[in-house]
Amino acid sequence: MKNRVAKVQKSLQEHNLDALLIRVFESDNQNVFYLSGFGGSCAVLLITKKHAFIITDSRYFVRVAKECPSLKLVKHERGHKITKHINDALQIAGLKPTARVGFEADHVSVELLRSWRKEIKAKLTATTHLIERLRQYKDEEEISLLAKACSATCAVYKEVVAIIKPGMSESEVAFELDMRLRKHGALGNSFPSIVASGPNSAVPHHATGSRKLKAGEPVVLDFGGLFPGGYCSDITRTVFVPGKKPNAKMIEIYNIVLEANKAAFKALKPGILWREYDKIARDYISDAGYGEFFGHGLGHSLGLVAHDPYDYMHDPFKVGMVVTDEPGIYIEGFGGVRIEDDVVITKKGVRNLTNAAPYWKF
């Protein structure tokens, strides 16, 4: 964590700032957690060029000592606004009211900013994605945590695919996914599990329902867990309900999507742009005659949330980038296929974190 704080302190100089405020209240704690290791729901970090403070209330004093001992705790006393203690920290850091203090524009409401401008003794300056740009690229510890999350999720997939049978409902399959994620150590889901059967498989983000599975039809399983350490997994497999051979066209579609997935993985390397990566799979599917049925992007960044920050328009892939590889074909009223893997760019090449079999074979 000290290394991450040091990167922020370096960024302060680059952005002509004396300090940065990072806030969490009830949710959206990823930036605070990333910089400090603090997992609570109410706190403000104040990072200056030489100091790092955490301001929180008595519910979290013990946790702060355990989770982020390198940060100086400023206790939020009952009956006082937290802005009083932000000012205390600014004073301890030796910053005057003329100091330029950044805040995260994406995480501070208009009303909160109004009160901050009245109460905080500093010149508040909006910043955009300062922390998120650091989160784009994972260090060795983060990759290790992601690999553990993905390994556990692959184990869940292997267990659930073995019990799928005709007559089960989508929601019953989703329950098995969710329950087994917890049994394998997840603290919760990365997102609500998607189980899309038969014609529902043609809806990329289908709302899992009560439809019963039928023999031979496709079932898209898109799920992931949030694991200890704070990192997420996200895997999609398309399976076929046993008891009947799948439709020949569905088999064709499945094989096309699988080969598009493999082609994109093979092409991924440091320096490639997102649009180039996406184009590999998209061209493969288009050349096979199904381009109009692949409407979404090839994937997304993965980390502390299922869709982690990443500047898709400008930043090339670098070592430490973790992304998904998830081409799909969706034909309304007929069915669809999606296959998703979580992959990381390393110094030694690209590594698949979710190579859970079976990929279906025909």
Image (cartoon, rainbow, N blue to C red):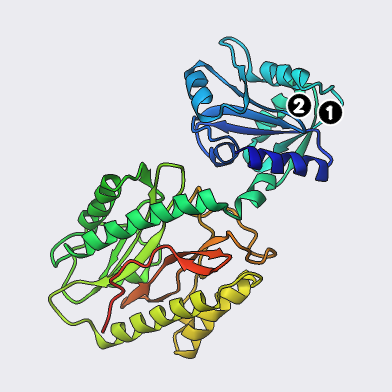
> Given the current orientation, which residue lies at the most extreme top position?
79
Q: Residue visible at 63% across and 64% down?
A: 318
- Could you say which quadrant of the image residue 237 lies in? bottom left
Whether residue 70 is visible here, answered yes or no, is: yes
Mark 2 is on which residue type?
Answer: Arg
Which of label 1 and label 2 is nearer to you?
1
Q: Residue visible at 16% across and 73% down?
A: 242
Element marked by disc 2:
helix
* Label 1: few (<14), some (14–19) or many (≥20) C-alpha neighbours in 10 Å: some
Quadrant holding the C terminus: bottom left
- Could you say which quadrant of the image residue 21 lies in? top right
- Residues at marks 1 and 2, CA–CA distance in whole angstroms: 13 Å
Element marked by disc 1:
loop
Q: Position of residue 172 (x, y in %)?
A: 20, 55
Mark 1 is on which residue type?
Answer: Ala
Q: Position of residue 158 (x, y in %)?
A: 25, 62
179 shown above or below 60: below
170 shown above or below 337: above
> Given the current orientation, which residue lies at the most extreme front position?
348
Q: Residue visible at 22% across and 59% down?
A: 159
224 left or right, relative to 84? left
Q: Position of residue 304 (x, y in %)?
A: 50, 47
Quadrant holding the N terminus: top right
Q: Which residue is mark 1?
A: 99
Whether residue 303 is visible here, answered yes or no, is: no
Q: Residue visible at 77% across and 18% down?
A: 91
Q: Position of residue 183 (x, y in %)?
A: 26, 46
Q: Which residue is mark 2?
A: 117
* Label 2: few (<14), some (14–19) or many (≥20) C-alpha neighbours in 10 Å: few
Q: Earlier in the sequence, mark 1 or mark 2?
A: 1
